[in-house]
Amino acid sequence: MEIFRKALLNLEPPEKFALQTVQEAIKPQRQTKLVLDENQLLENILRTLLQELVSCAVQSGDPTMHYGQSIADGDNANGQIPRLLDIVLYLCEKEHVEGGMIFQLLEDLTEMSTMKNCKDIFAYIESKQDILGKQELFARGKLVMLRTCNQLLRRLSKANDVVFCGRILMFLAHFFPLSERSAVNIKGVFNTSNETTFEKEAPKGISTDFNFYKTFWSLQEYFCNPPSLTVNPTKWHRFTSSLTVVLNTFEAQPLSDEEGNANNLEEEGAAVNIKYLTSSKLMGLELKDPSFRRHVLVQCLILFDYVKAPGKSDKDLPSEAMKEEIKTSEERVKKLLEVTPPKGKEFLSSIEHILEREKNWVWWKRDGCPPFEKQPAEKKVDGTKKRRPRWRLGNKELSQLWKWSDQNPNALTDPERVRTPAVVDYWKPMADDMDPSAGIEAEYHHKNKKVYCWKGLRLSARQDLEGFSRFTEFGIEGVVPLELLPAELRSKYQAKPNEKSKRAKKSGTKGSVPSSEDNQGTALECEMDGEGGQNDLEAPSAAMDLDSTPITGNNSQAGTPTQDELEKQNSESPDAQEAGELDAEEDVEPGLIDGETDADVDL
């Protein structure tokens, strides 16, 4: 113990002498970490030393946390007890001693000190909150710290030490995680010790309805302990009847906006919670107070919300009759809150939002308080930041592609490289499908593959325009080159001569005398045949018109009929017309039958 007394006089940081002091006092088996028996021995020494220091501080009349402070060092120097706590805290943080030792010393120190000195002790605890909250220390001493704070709260006065109580509660809220089970009231126990006392007998000279007074204040018994209503039907009927009387009175005495503004409810946000007086003389004034009404109505909503919440078993659920009564009463309470000035609708909306969030809190507790904090991301062991690789062409893919082209100069001339196939090679699989002798089932034909057909159409549109034009009449099978098809299928997809080609050939074989009108008609007919864009029905009519125009002109210019006029007259008879058509069919070149276009006809 004398070794630690000397160490308390050392003003250097604890990390320079703390471990050496422990090794000299205990002489441990290990150099950096004590075993179980050695920890117990060290704890007894430190607790005894702490008790002696507190006793000396009391005898000298100095505050506990300032005892032993040197005047020469000024206000920056700590007393002997804070230095002792710093040494133990350092040893616990570095895991040289058991982690719960510092919490045990703090509990002993608060128990031995007065409430005035406990404020200084708690200030030290608040200053070391980050270190005490580390996982290696928190797991060992959280229950001891909770017990220490609860003991302080019991010793404090709720009326005179409100600020100190708030500091303790704020410390616990920061020290423990949000999902800590010890601070969430798992069982949902109500504070039944907060009883509301009121007059049982009517005083003399009071004009207030004393029956209503007793009925009104009797509701606080049920608000204080809502579980009693679910297990006792008699209490529930008594509560509903009393609540109905109170709600009827509130509805019969509505408040005006002037009364709401006169009470300055907007300034109550900075005030503490009010505990209203229960004197029967004040009953009339309290009924006119909007804040008083809101407190009572909100208590009703909280009780209804608790009763409606599903329990852990079916027996905890309210009956159908209770549900109906709760629904009716809840609607009446909400209407009263809405019409209570000022800003009744906004106030009701806020209360409903709070109660909705309270349901989530209740469900979380009933599920066993599962932790929902996200663990921090693990930091990389290597502290050096890796440089991003630089590429010659900006990224890895382009650089590799350029390097590959340098290493393979014959890539473009390689016969095995991927290239656009010829039309004949591409359509060969579909031609095999169309061959009846192949015996390929229809469901396995290439025409069922949409991507294959789409690529084939794009390829034929570039390399085989004639085959691409057959798509409109024959579909995708008509696009297949004819040389790939068998003979019996080839004739099906070959082009047939049209009537326009027949008339063009007929007019070209005639030996008529040309005239100006003939030349114009012939030129117009050739131009129309060269375009090839007219329908088959329009072409014959145009040809007939052009044939008739020059004949009429020749008759007007010369009196002697020409050879063409004689042929025209002969063609008017049915026999001559049939003979002329036969001659025209015989004069058609064989190439037209093989699928030549109109543009190939020699006029």
Image (tube, grey):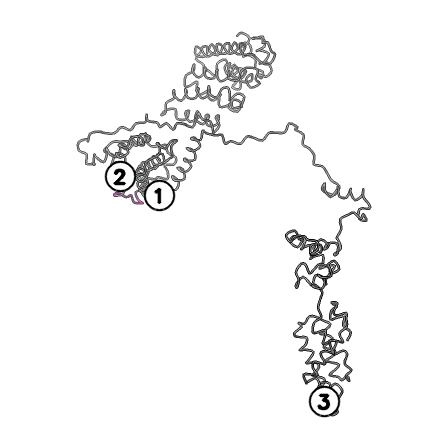
Residue depicted at 49% across the width and 19% down the height: 141
Mark 2 is surrounded, within 10 Å at the Cα level, by few (under 14), some (14 to 19) or many (20 or more) other residues, namely few
Which residue type carries mark 1? Gly
Q: Nearer the viewer, residue 247 or 421?
A: 421
Q: Which is more N-terminal, label 3 or label 2? A: 2
Mark 1 is surrounded, within 10 Å at the Cα level, by few (under 14), some (14 to 19) or many (20 or more) other residues, namely some
- Name the residue carrying label 3: 555
Q: Which is more N-terminal, label 1 or label 3? A: 1
Task: Magenta stretch: give its range.
Answer: 252-259
Q: Secondary structure at mark 2?
A: helix
Residue found at the far top of this picture: 2
Any magenta on residue 151?
no
Q: Nearer the viewer, residue 256 or 459?
A: 459
Q: Give the distance between the C-alpha atoms of the residues marked 1 and 2, in whole angstroms.
A: 21 Å
Which part of the image, by quadrant, shows the C terminus?
Answer: bottom right
- Name the residue carrying label 2: 244
Q: Which quadrant would residue 526 be assigned to in this image?
A: bottom right
Which residue type carries mark 2? Thr
Single out the mark in the foreground, 1 or 2.
Answer: 2
Residue 160: image x %, image y %?
Answer: 37, 24
Which residue type carries mark 3? Asn
Q: Which is more N-terminal, label 2 or label 1? A: 2
Residue found at the far bottom of this picture: 559
Single out the mark in the foreground, 3 or 1.
Answer: 3
Q: Which quadrant would residue 576 be assigned to in this image?
A: bottom right
Q: Nearer the viewer, residue 85 or 571?
A: 571
